[in-house]
Amino acid sequence: MSANNSDVLILGGGVVGLACAHYLLQAGRSVRIIERGRIGAATSHGNCGTITPSHAPPLAAPGMVLKGLKYMLTPDAPLYIQPRLDWSLANWLLRFSRRCNHRDWRRTALAKSELLQASRRLLDELVRERQLDCGYEKNGAHQVYRNAKTFEHDCAELPELAEFGIESRVLSESELIADEPSLKPGAVGAIHYPGDAHLRPERYCAELARLVRDAGGEIEEGVTINAFLRENGRVAVATTTGPREGRDVLMALGPWSPLWSKQLGLRLPIQPGKGYSITYSRPTLAPRRPLVLKERSVCVTTWADGFRLGSTMEFSGYDASLNRTRLDALERAALEYLHEPTGPKKIEEWFGWRPMTYDDMPILGRAPGLENFWLATGHGMLGVTMSAVTGHLLADLICGRAPIVDPLPSSPQRFA
């Protein structure tokens, strides 16, 4: 095999590409990752690092269309769609709206729950057995409410979530304040999800990269894809440092996947959903576990060495600017709920695009009509959470092993 050829060539060095590389190496395959920037420095860098089996229910839920229309008029709302003429986005939104019914909601939640819970178990094993230094903690998460009607509505859904394997516990206002003194008075209660966890995502990526290199995997940073080369159903890649080939080629390019896949005649229904975060040094009175400030859809994560506010969903194409209104909304939400809404030092303001599919399921498996081309993309807001199961499943499929989970709900064939 020449210096530019690989057994498995992985395109993209974010958390998904790194996890796939790890499990493929464990399966006995040799691996080369090419990454245009630095490993884990794009979408995998500034998210809140929550591991959330509780997030199995999809975004396409009954009532979401009306809620989205109300948000359209509010630039700092949790969901914002930048007004513009974009037929691809319009088609995506139409397909999304058709899934805002209970039947599709339940079907997707069941399929996502299998992926999420398998990934949580694999991540536990990975951190423990490989001694990953990534701030991993398994102390659950609180979804905090200040609106009684919203709280009652979500509590009424908990029996159905239990059918999906999602464990929960309802906390009264007094129980919540006793458990989480960082919260201001005014919360009406919370839902605690003991199966959730959290880690520092940038350190998790660094540790995965260490595992890949230690196992003999090659990682090339600063290598940009120029074009795909297709011949007889097989794919190779032209890059800024020369051609790259693989017996198998795995695309893990996250939100950029639909742009590159067009060269191969693939139409991946992915929209870039822009999320924001602000990272601070740790406040004196910091939350003891991750919090979701429900009415504002803002996530709060604390680590031993830091504190992060994040979330929001903005559909504005590949606009690479930091939206001051969206960033300020994170701090306003934290001020509403927390005694110390920010840390003493602001370290970073960040945005990243999430690869959003209209059915809220990732795209995992062999690309239709291509012999050696595989897809691991479309994870939405759950790339970190689903990274381990994605890596394991793609290694299973590429190596011809029995898959760890049912591959059909996430198969690329569903769009063929």
Image: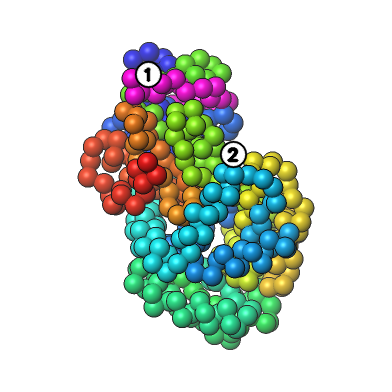
Q: Crowding at label 1, few (<14), some or many (≥20) Cα neighbours within 10 Å?
A: few
Q: Residue at x 64, y 41 (%)?
A: 318
Relative to 65, 393 lies left or right: left
Label of residue 231 in the image = 1
Q: Mark 1 is on which residue type?
A: Glu
Image coordinates of residue 263 in percent, x first then y, are: 49, 27
**How many numbered marks are there?**
2
Q: Residue at x 53, y 82 (%)?
A: 152
Image coordinates of residue 203 in percent, x first then y, are: 54, 45
Mark 1 and mark 2 lie on one chain; the one further toward the N terminus is 2
Q: Residue furthest top?
A: 2
Relative to 279, 33 lies left or right: left
> Is residue 332 covered in magenta?
no
Image coordinates of residue 123 in percent, x first then y, are: 40, 52
Q: Mark 2 is on which residue type?
A: Ala
Q: Crowding at label 2, few (<14), some or many (≥20) Cα neighbours within 10 Å?
A: some
Give the quadrant of the C terminus.
Answer: top left
Q: Residue at x 68, y 82 (%)?
A: 185
Residue segment shown in magenta: 213-237
**In which quadrant of the rendered view does residue 332 lie?**
bottom right
Give the quadrant of the N terminus.
Answer: top left
The relative height of residue 130 versus residue 39 in the rendered view (above or below) is below
Q: Residue at x 49, y 19 (%)?
A: 238
Q: What main secondary structure does the magenta stretch of the protein show?
A: strand
- Which residue corresponds to mark 2? 41
Image coordinates of residue 256 in percent, x first then y, are: 55, 37
Q: Which of label 1 and label 2 is nearer to you?
A: 1
Give the distance between the C-alpha atoms of the residues marked 1 and 2, in whole angstroms: 32 Å
The relative height of residue 365 versus residue 280 in the rendered view (above or below) is above
